[in-house]
Amino acid sequence: MKNLEEQKRYERAKERVEELKKFYNNLFSYIIVIIFLAGLNYYQNEWRYAWFLWAAFGWGIGLAFHAIKAYRINPMFNKDWEERKIRKYMEEDDKENQLWE
């Protein structure tokens, strides 16, 4: 039993590390691409119209949501919340089935 629990803990930790790796890869890509676009923008029109900010803003919103998910800042959508909801709906389903029996 202890070995099975240890395996589950390992799998959860591994999933968490994978989430963080994906976030850091996304962050690194964001920084590189935005710097490139800023350089291209400066080369084209010397900041007369900073169009690269549109890409930075749009991708930045997605990156912020990715960070929230990776660091589990929003407690509403974490695994505990999912498990509580599943148990709640299963209990409601059991109560409905008991009424019809």
Image (cartoon, grey):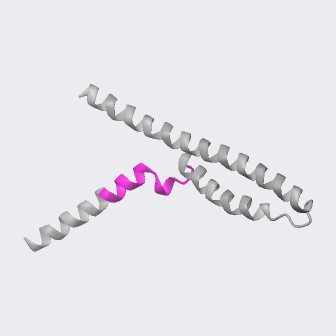
Could you tell me which residue is drawn at 66 percent across and 47 percent down? 29
Could you tell me which residue is drawn at 13 percent across and 67 percent down? 98
Q: For the image shown, how many numbered marks are present on the structure?
A: 0
Left or right: where does residue 75 sit relative to residue 4? right
Q: Is residue 67 above or below residue 11?
A: below
Q: Where is residue 72 drawn, in percent x and y?
A: 53, 48
Q: Is residue 4 above or below residue 62?
A: above
Please tell me which residue lies in front, 73 or 50: 50
Left or right: where does residue 69 sit relative to residue 84? right
Q: Where is residue 28 drawn, in percent x and y?
A: 66, 43
Q: Quadrant of residue 84?
A: bottom left
* Magenta stretch prevailing secondary structure: helix
Q: Quadrant of residue 4?
A: top left
| Quadrant (top left, top right, bottom left, bottom right) of the C terminus | bottom left
Q: Where is residue 33 drawn, in percent x and y?
A: 71, 50
Q: Residue furthest left?
A: 101
Left or right: where does residue 96 sit relative to residue 38? left
Please tell me which residue lies in front, 14 or 89: 14
- Residue 20 within the magenta-colored segment of the rendering: no
| Quadrant (top left, top right, bottom left, bottom right) of the N terminus | top left
Please tell me which residue lies in front, 63 or 88: 63
Q: Residue furthest bottom?
A: 100
- Residue 76 within the magenta-colored segment of the rendering: yes
Q: Residue furthest front?
A: 44
Q: Quadrant of residue 93?
A: bottom left
Look at the image and give the residue range highlighted in magenta. 73-86
Q: Is residue 32 above or below residue 58?
A: above
